[in-house]
Image (cartoon, rainbow, N blue to C red):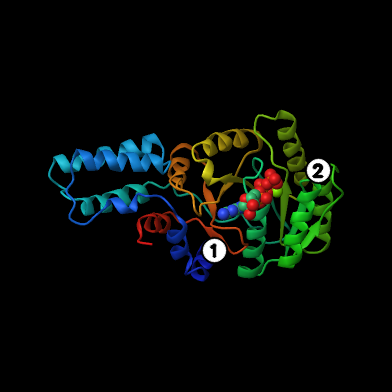
Amino acid sequence: MGFFSRTLDKLKGALKKTSEVLNTDVRTLFIPGRQIDDDFLNELEERFLRADMGVNNVQRIVKELRDRWRLGKIKNAADCLGVVKSQLTDNWPQHDRELNLQPSGPTVILVAGINGAGKTTSIAKLAWLLKNEMGKKVMVCASDTFRAAAVDQLTIWADRLGVDIVKHKMGADPAAVAYDACESAKARGIDVLIVDTAGRLHTQDHLMRELTKIRDVVAKRIPGAPHEVLLVLDATTGQNALNQAKSFSQAIGVTGIVLAKLDGTAKGGVIFAIRDQLSIPVKFIGLGETPQDIETFDPPRFVEALFAEK
Ligand SMILES: Nc1nc2c(ncn2[C@@H]2O[C@H](COP(=O)(O)OP(=O)(O)OP(=O)(O)O)[C@@H](O)[C@H]2O)c(=O)[nH]1
Ligand SMILES: [Mg+2]
């Protein structure tokens, strides 16, 4: 049984959590008994745009609804809900959302993103998930040597979660820390090594090259590494996240997205824009600040949660 289904079984309450924390105002539109008219369709379009679903998506869905309404196939708001849900659910590409875990030897996960996106917190979440849900031996690597606080933050998480950490002093070469972590992970029989990196803008060429250097170093130490390059995106930045993803992807070859901070944002619809515009799967979603606030991303469940009553 794969990672995905195992995790789903264990996280039974997770859908409830998603519907509780998703904060878009699309669900309140489908009032029972309300008839479809131009006002309704315009309002629906507006709210979908506000949820940051992306113009193409929204136009496609609204056109579909308008066509069906004109043909007399649907009459009231409640009929729309079913169409919208299936429009949102049906077109997900068959992405493999499982982590590419190696059967033996350390799996290396490189984590990148802009400043404050939620990288270090997402690493704590992944470490928690891998250790507690999957029984993996996890090590984290403090390759964000830019700020002293960054190493401290990761150290605190490692201590709390009971996972190993490899770190150097602040200002050290991030690739050298990664080198040591790879050696240490092999020596200690670690299953998964997760590498934290400093936040950077995709426009900062020298910092993007630093990421490439870390990637090259781990590739030399461990066959096939990094097995995952996860880009952490902050859902509250909405459509901006798409540009970040495109640039990071060109620079370092992203294999999956962690969409953090979906709790409490009204821009949760950005996940549909990501599907529309990028060929990178969202693998995990972040729903809060504790290590347990993570879910594997499951499109149908997400769509259900988006329209579920709170
Ligand atoms: N509500 C919420 N807050 C989050 C989530 N993920 C991260 N945060 C918060 O966002 C802030 C930044 O998170 P970090 O994990 O430090 O972000 P980072 O990308 O490592 O930041 P730098 O290393 O400074 O670039 C912290 O206050 C986290 O608690 C999430 O899913 N939900
Ligand atoms: Mg960090």
Residue 170, compared with residue 122, is above or below; it is above
Choose the circle earlier in sequence order: 1 or 2. 1
Relative to 61, 237 lies left or right: right
Please tell me which residue is depicted at 79% across the width and 42% down the height of the picture: 146
From the viewer's side, name the closer residue of 210 and 99.
Answer: 210
Residue topped by disc 1: 2
Q: Observer-nearest residue: 215 or 161?
A: 161
Secondary structure found at label 1: loop
As drawn, 209 above or below 284: above
Residue 102: horizontal and vertical position, in percent?
Answer: 66, 58
Category of crowding for the residue at label 2, using alpha-carbon neighbours closer than 10 angstroms: few (below 14), some (14–19), many (at least 20): many
- Label ID, residue 175: 2
Q: Quadrant of residue 116?
A: top right
* Rendered position, 45 above or below 108: above
Left or right placement of residue 223 versus residue 96 in this view: right
254 left or right, relative to 91: right
Residue type at the position of mark 2 = Ala
